[in-house]
Each structure stands twice: as C-alpha cells, then as structure tokens.
Image (tube, rainbow, N blue to C red):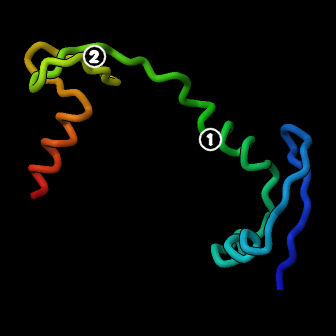
Amino acid sequence: MYQDKTLVCKDCGNEFVFTAGEQEFYASRGFENEPQRCKACRDARKNGGRGQREMFTAVCASCGKEARVPFKPREDRPVYCSECFARMKEEENG
C-alpha cells in the first residue's frame, strides 16, 4: 500500500505532498521516479515556454461586435466573436 510522502521541490524549495493516489497513478503508468517539482512549479515550467499570446482586434462578421482573436485577421476571411463562433459550431454539429 502507498502512503503520502512529503517531498521538497527542487525549484522553489517548498515541501509538497506526493499522495498515495498520485503514487498509485505513477506506478500504473510505469513511472519509476518521484516528482521533483510541486504542482505550481510544474505548471509554471509547462507554460513557461509559450509566453503571452498576442491578440488582435477585429469586427465580428456576424453580429458586428468587437472580437479579440489570437491571429492576425485577413480581409478575405470572416472573423467571428467567441459567441457567434460557438453558435456556428453548435449548428454545424447539429
């Protein structure tokens, strides 16, 4: 049986708990090493390489509201706000 273990994060130095459930999950996946970083440091490391995404402003081709999109809009392609885009996807999927 697994028991909770207290580990020390190699990045921030804080203690974190490696729970019995997490240990069981690691074992079921064949992982042999314990985690070396706490959840916060793992998440920061995972997202660290991406940086901030540049957003562009456009006018929704459906409702005319301002839309913020993560790509540079082109004049030959319509751009939709998130609400109109979701509605169109819903209609498309029936």
The vertical placement of 5 against 83, above or below, is below
Q: Which mark is residue 72?
A: 2
Inspect the image, locate mark 2, and give the three-letter code of the amino acid beneath it.
Lys
On the image, the x and y values in percent for residue 67 come to 26, 20
Q: Where is residue 3 in the image (x, y as percent from the top left)?
A: 87, 76
Instruction: Tell me which corner region of the image, top left, top right, bottom left or bottom right, holds residue 45.
Output: top right
Q: Residues within 10 Å of mark 1 (few under 14, many from 20)?
A: few
List x then y, in percent, for residue 36: 82, 52
Tell which circle, 2 or 1, labels the residue nearer the N-terminal end: 1
Query: Which of the pair 31/72 is nearer the observer?
Result: 72
* Quarter placement of the N terminus: bottom right
Within the image, what quadrant is residue 88 found in?
A: top left
Disc 1 secondary structure class: helix
Q: Which of 60 and 73 is in front in this view?
A: 60
Q: In which quarter of the image is residue 14?
A: top right
What residue is drawn where x is 87% and y is 44%?
10
> Is 79 above or below relative to 44?
above
The structure residue drawn at horizontal position 66% and vertical position 43%, both measured from the top left corner, is: 43
Look at mark 1 in the image and give the residue it sits on: 46
Vertical position of residue 57 compared to residue 1: above or below: above
* 69 or 82: nearer the viewer: 82
At 63% across and 73% down in the image, what residue appears? Answer: 29
| Image quarter (top left, top right, bottom left or bottom right) of the C terminus | bottom left
Secondary structure found at label 2: loop
Q: Are marks 2 and 1 in contact (CB under 8 Å)?
A: no
Question: Residues under labels 2 and 1: Cα distance?
Answer: 26 Å
